[in-house]
Image (spheres, rainbow, N blue to C red):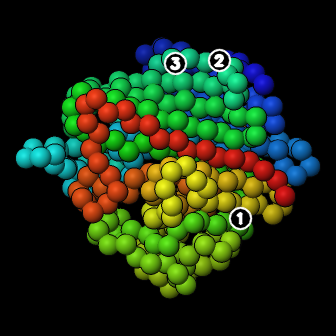
Amino acid sequence: MSITKAPFGAMPDGTPVEQFLLQGEGGLRASIIPFGCRIVSLEAPDRSGKTANVVLGHDTLDPYLDPENFQGTAVGRYANRIAGGKFSIGDKTYTLAKNNGENALHGGPTGFAHRLWIVKDASETPEGPCVTFSYTSADGEEGYPGNLTVEIAYTVTKDNTLRIVYRAETDAPTAVNLTNHAFFNLSGDPSRSILSHELQIHADAITAVREDLIPTGELTPIAGTPYDFNEPKTIGRDMDTDDAMLQRCHGYDHNYVLRGEGLRKVAEAYEPDSGRVMETYTDLPGMQLYTANGLSGIGHGGVPFVSHGAFCLETQFFPDSPNHPEFPFHFLQPGEKFETVTAYRFLTR
């Protein structure tokens, strides 16, 4: 195992940005940059031992500077949507920056995804090579209350797992929901769609949503519906069924209510041609399945992205939880230590 650095470009003000290359014992290799704590690439072996990049991204920094680009990034302060761009803590209402119609999305137009984080540490640990980034979000940034200090650590472990640990502390009550927005394609070929990938998700319901994807507060059972992935099936099998939200979104863009508590396996994806398997573990209650609906642009090696060319499994608290006291969420308080873990483990069969 090893950890090395290489230049990756410069910010508009000339500040250099480096990529950190984490090489694990089992063949998994991750490239992470401090701009948005982004996973630039993630190389995983197939059933014959040949490695390929299974995360969509770019070869240079410039495309990531686009405020609409969330590929591979850490998302915060609050991942997903907040209705009307506002929430209340006690008798005080906070108004957020809106960037999704009348709603706030992924922390706002310049949320954590578009900040240059500090490299706190990069070292080889007993578990594997690890890089830790930190960022302090000032009181009032994007409308959120409290000075929030965040650390995100990426480790490539000996069993071919990319483990992500999120930690945060605040000096005033605030809303925190951190995730990663990696776009996965286990074939290693970004020009292919992921509709033939097989997916299993351990969930019995999704959060019902309005047309703008804001939760209504209801949980919709999914047994026997196009949203049911309890038994493995191809992602594309039921995507074109006569379902209003699937048609509106042109695919999946839904929060799954995960079974169980604590760190547990919540999903498994399998790509038959390469034999790659990706298991997802989290201690969070929800996970957004997004199938890169209408994806466009140019990625690694100059290869154009294609619609449904990737899938995202974004572990999270439910969307708009600050406005739904019935959801499993609470505002982070001063003196509390926020910590959550998500892990993506790569196998073959």
Residue 298 in sight here: no
Residue 28 position by quadrant: top right
> Looking at the image, is 14 positioned above or below residue 108?
above
Q: Residue 285: percent from the left, percent from the top?
A: 44, 56
Tell me which residue sits at (84%, 58%) in the image. 349
Q: How crowded is mark 3: few (under 14 residues within 10 Å), some or many (20 or more)?
A: some
Q: Name, please, the residue furthest toward the right.
A: 48
Q: Is mark 1 on a helix, strand or loop?
A: loop
- Where does label 1 land, which residue? 197
- Tell me which amino acid carries mark 3: Val
Q: Position of residue 123 (x, y in %)?
A: 65, 17
Q: Can residue 79 be seen in this view?
A: yes
- Name, please, the residue furthest toward the left: 91
**Which circle's residue, 1 or 3, is located before the other in the chain?**
3
Q: Which mark is residue 119?
A: 3
Q: Is label 1 in contact with label 3 (beta carbons under 8 Å)?
A: no
Q: Which of marks 2 and 3 is in front?
A: 2
On the rendered structure, is 203 left or right of 219? right
